[in-house]
Amino acid sequence: MESGWEKAREAEFNKKGFSSMFHHVSGVSFGSMQHRVFVRTICSFFMVISKTLLKNHTQGGAAPKEVLSYVNHQLCQNNDSLMFCTVWLGILDLRNGRLTASCAGHEYPALKRSGGMYELIINKHDPPIGLRDGLRFHEYELTLSPGDFLFEYTDGVTEATGASGELFGEEQLIQTLNTDPDAAPQAQVKRVYEAIHTFMKGTPQFDDITMLCIQYKGCERDGGLDTTFRES
């Protein structure tokens, strides 16, 4: 058995807002190498379709839960290969710091309030998109104040595997972020990346390691955000 997967992250800015999408596609294949290559090809094709649908419908001004409902319906049509996506989709209004987000089976983001420490945002997880038509998705809102940080990532971060088979995990991620909670996004992402590879101790990387860290600065300062991506 082999798992086929692809991943993506998308972020866009305009004068009023910032949208970010973390997105992971999975499927399973059995049998010959030809079949496995075929499933990898399907995963890549499914990735392109789902990424395009998510991006275009978000740009149309729909709320995150509406985007996920629409894309889920589209992906469920003729999905004989049983592909599915986990998605965290957040839209941040740079004018007032209001973040509206929906989560379809993806990892919990971490939030650090100004002067505080990083903590996971524990909200309702809906199922991944593509599994079943007619699903309704939830969304949540929170307001970022100047100096707040948001950290999002794929499961390749928390599921990075050490030499003894243990996982890096959410607890160690939060501990790493809180080593220097006020570090700039670029330094924070670099610190987590280095901590993961120290933890792995040469163990082969089996999944992507993709991270996003943003600091909200308010609507009047430096475009409103300091943002860093990293993927490997």
Image (spheres, grey):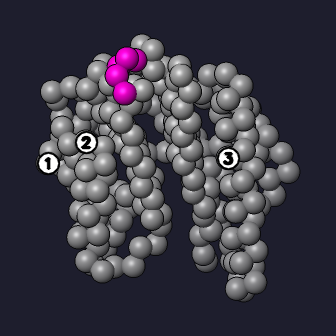
Q: Residue at x 41, y 73 (%)?
A: 205
How far across and how far down the image is residue 117, in percent? 18, 34
User: Residue farthest to the right?
Assistant: 78
The disc at residue 51 is 3
Q: In the image, 71: left or right of 116?
A: right
Residue 120 visible in the shown view = yes
User: Residue farthest to the top?
Assistant: 96
Which residue is more in the foreground, 191 or 122?
191
| C-alpha gap between disc 1 and disc 2 | 12 Å
Mark 2 crowdedness (10 Å alpha carbons): few <14, some 14-19, many ≥20: some
Quadrant in which residue 111 is drawn: top left
Identified by mark 1, the residue type is Thr
Quadrant in which residue 213 is drawn: top left
Identified by mark 2, the residue type is Ala
Q: Earlier in the sequence, mark 1 or mark 2?
A: 1
| Residue at the disc numbered 2 | 184
Query: Number of marks in the image?
Result: 3
How far across and how far down the image is residue 65, in percent? 61, 26
Extent of the magenta region: 218-222
